[in-house]
Amino acid sequence: MCLFKYMPEARIDDILVLNKIRFTQPICFNDPFECKLTINSIAPDDYIVNLYKEEFKKIDIMNRLNKEQLSNSLEKIINGKNYIQRFRTKFEEILNYKWGILSLTTSKGNLLMWAHYANEHKGFTVEFNEESDFFHKREDKESFFNHLHKVDYSNYRDLTSLIEKQYANVFLTKSTEWEYEDEYRVFKQLSSANEVKNENIYLFNFPKDMINAIYCGCNMDKVHKEKILNILSNDNELSYVKLYYGEISTKYYKKNFNEINKVT
């Protein structure tokens, strides 16, 4: 499987000269639902009731509190919306300052992604080798970081109690309206970034041999195509990388990609 990343032409040097790629904080994404925590209670009512029944037995023995006080406490916990909101706010704050996400796709020809992420077809798409160690660096089987995850799509948000929450769903589920992106993700801790630009752009080094090919947008300026071609031609470590130029199909609403070795 090959993975693709759509980018504007301003990222040419970052990718092909510096070999750095951005991991983006969820707060910077264009989907307002991105990585938002949905919880409707601290725990299921029956879970809390059973827990407090055990406490009632202790109180009968130790005579520390009366049952009315305990019932009031139980009601506050079951309906603890202030606590839930504080937890949700803190969760998202930590996530946005601690985690970065690299979003990839299995499609190189999606017209919407060319328009949204590659500066209206003036940018480029990089084809990465999915087998690269860069995508498979998890420290252990339980680690969520440094390896590929497939994004799932749903019409429904994962609204559950805090204690029942499957946190992977928070980071790996999006609306079915995004299904056309067929997204894969890699998560990294921002503290391990190799470079930080403008205080909030986190860049990570990647190996050159991770690149398979470059696809230029159909609206890319000649000067940028020449720049990419010159970089590939003058870097022995990238000389194997194939370069393609996108052209609008005369028959279908799609782009055709033709391999080039010179810019005309």
Image: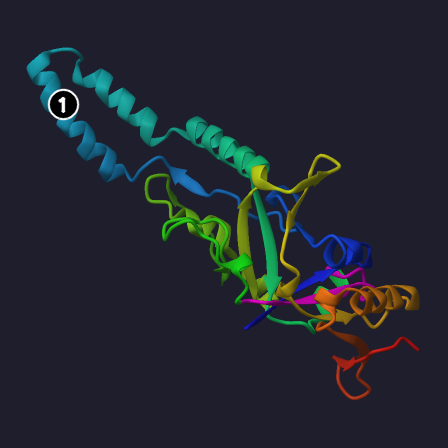
Q: Which segment is the magenta one?
A: 117-130
Query: To which quarter of the image does residue 263 belong?
Result: bottom right
Instruction: Judge left or right: residue 70 versus residue 178.
Output: left
**Residue farthest toward the front in the current orientation of the protein:** 236
Residue 194, given in percent of the width and then of the height, sits at 64, 42
Residue 21, given in percent of the width and then of the height, sits at 67, 52
In the displayed structure, 57 sits above or below 191; it is above
Q: Reply yes or no: does residue 231 show up in magenta.
A: no
- Residue drawn at 53 percent across, 34 percent down: 94
- Residue drawn at 80 percent across, 60 percent down: 119
Q: Amino acid at mark 1?
A: Phe
Residue 18, given in percent of the width and then of the height, sits at 74, 52
Residue 126, given in percent of the width and then of the height, sits at 69, 66
Question: What residue is shown with label 1?
Answer: 56
Instruction: Judge left or right: residue 83 versus residue 21.
Output: left
Regarding mark 1 in the picture, which secondary structure is present there? helix
Q: Which image quarter holds the N terminus?
A: bottom right
- Residue drawn at 91 percent across, 68 percent down: 222
In the displayed structure, 61 sits above or below 122; it is above
Query: To which quarter of the image does residue 12 belong?
Result: bottom right
Q: Which image quarter holds the C terminus?
A: bottom right
Q: Reply yes or no: does residue 121 show up in magenta.
A: yes
**Residue farthest toward the bottom in the current orientation of the protein:** 251
